[in-house]
Amino acid sequence: MQTLTNRAKIVERKPMSMGERMYLPAIFKGMWITFKHIFRKKATINYPEQKRPFSPVFRGLHVLNRDAEGRENCTACGLCAVACPAEAITMEAAERKPGEEHLYREEKYAAKYEINMLRCIFCGLCEEACPKDAIYLSETFAPANYQRQGFIYGKDDLLIPNPVTEPEAYQKALGGRVVKEMTH
Amino acid sequence: MLLTIEWPVVLEKLILIIIVVSGSLVIAMYTTFAERKVAAVIQDRRGPNRAGPFGLLQPLADGLKLFFKEEIIPSFSNKALFILGPCLAMLTAMMTGAVIPWGSSVHLFDRTISLQIADINIGVLFVFGVVSMGVYGIMIGGWASNNKYSLLGGLRAASQIISYELPMGITMIALLMVTGTLSLNEMVVQQQQTMWNFCYQPLGFLIFLICAFAECNRTPFDLPEAENELIGGYHTEYSSMKLGFFLFAEYINMFISSAVMATLFFGGYDIIPFYDESAWGLSQNTMAILGTLALLVKIGFFLFLFMWVRWTIPRFRYDQLMNLGWKILLPLSLVNMLGTGAVILLKQNGWHF
């Protein structure tokens, strides 16, 4: 028979010899293999206590970013919502009032910012579309929930802790991420 | 008077029965745990380790779960037999422990107490009779479920056990010709004095081992409950602790057949082969305890073997199973029996041809 590639192996179908038909040597060989596996390193880990590290480019839950002074970066331009192929992002814009300069970096901000984690496909296009570095995908994933409503993440779920008022929580949320200096 | 009841004997036997029954239940419980752990380590996993330290409370959790599960008796089933099935499986599994010598004898309260519940002179035949009764539980359960898969599972169990009982029995005949007794305790005493029966009957042991796997419905002979062909086999319709009884009976059967194999071929409670342990000069009680421990170690090895084989070898096809039983094991055991008989005859004639 002509083979298509040189990797093809012809399966031999010759009748088994007497020794092979005893089966016992083959059985002992197999049992030796399983016995050796008893002393192998375990392939699994004790999950909740130990966790495998994610890749640094892992695209997990979204985080709404703040700048170094703790002001929200997002200006509710809507580019992320436009870029989103799953239409998971909803937002409502509002105008910054006088006296709110320490909360929002620019004159316009997102009063409501919701991501439906059941719709989201974690493609990261929102992060790519954002001109203000206001949204990025972190290295955690959405925990399980009993209600669908629980998967709609609002601003209080998404916003990173304020680096001025709660620096420790901010550092924890930041993880190993390097903060880019934004130019206006 | 012949029928006078000796109360101390009744009491000591009662205590022994309680110890053996609860002991075999506990060991069967932990065998389920060991099975999962062995499966895990063979497959490079960790196995149950959440309930209690090292997961040691896992069998309790499993049992508790089975107790609290909803008990479903299908409306189309034969109710009386449906309930009788698991009861019978459990009963026959527990009964065999009565004739196994769990140790020599201890000296307590000025009495010599044998660590065997009943030293009947036909111990081996009793084991065989009860073990083959065990299939009734499976068959009745499978039939009473009134379900095609269950019925198939029950039928498979019945024909499988009939097929493998034969070579097992013939192997036993060869062994009985060597030992000349049917009493399990006497066999052990003989093995202590000379050598383990395994040395006289290696082929017999191999056949017996394979048949024991088949009798216990363990992989590679677990066709009665072959999950991917028969859903659950004979216990498809069972739920709650009735299912638990079936599964449990399997593990008790494993334990008992390990004990029978250790007793028949590996010297029972004999500690070291080819060695007279009385040279240690230990007291009778210490020796009895050491002997029981030795028996438990042997049983543990066989239990491990059961699991090890289960997680190594895939299941037989049904025609292969029948071929192995009738065309290979039966002739082999016949040859073994005739060969043993011929050697014994020659030996009695002083090796004169």
Image: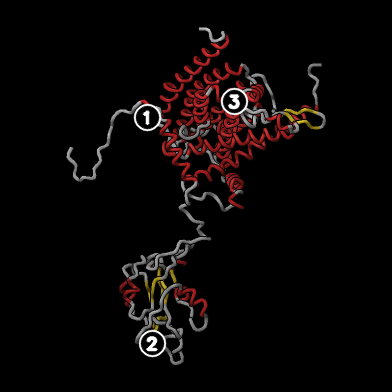
Q: Is residue B166 left or right of residue B296?
A: left
* Disc 3 from disc 1: Cα separation: 30 Å
For the residues carrying marks 1 and 2, which lies nearer the camera in this image?
1
* Disc 2 from disc 3: Cα separation: 91 Å
Spot occupied by residue A161 in the image (x, y as percentages of width and height): 48, 78
* Disc 1 from disc 2: Cα separation: 80 Å
Where, by quadrant of the figure, is residue B179 drawn? top right
For the residues carrying marks 3 and 1, which lies nearer the camera in this image?
3
Between residue A124 and residue A93, name the one nearer to us. Answer: A124
Spot occupied by residue B311 in the image (x, y as percentages of width and height): 47, 40
Count of marks, rendered view = 3
Amino acid identity at mark 2: Glu
Residue A20's tag is 1
Q: Is residue A10 above or below residue B335?
A: below
The N terminus of chain B sits in image quarter: top right
Q: Is residue A102 above or below residue B34?
A: below
Marks 2 and 3 close (CB-CB < 8 Å): no
Asked if badge 2 and badge 3 are on a common chain, one would say no
Asked if badge 3 and badge 1 are on a common chain, one would say no
The residue positioned farthest toward the left in the image shown: A2
Asked if badge 1 and badge 2 are on a common chain, one would say yes
Amino acid identity at mark 3: Trp
Q: Is residue A130 above or below residue B39?
A: below
Residue B196's tag is 3
> Label 2 belongs to which residue?
A106
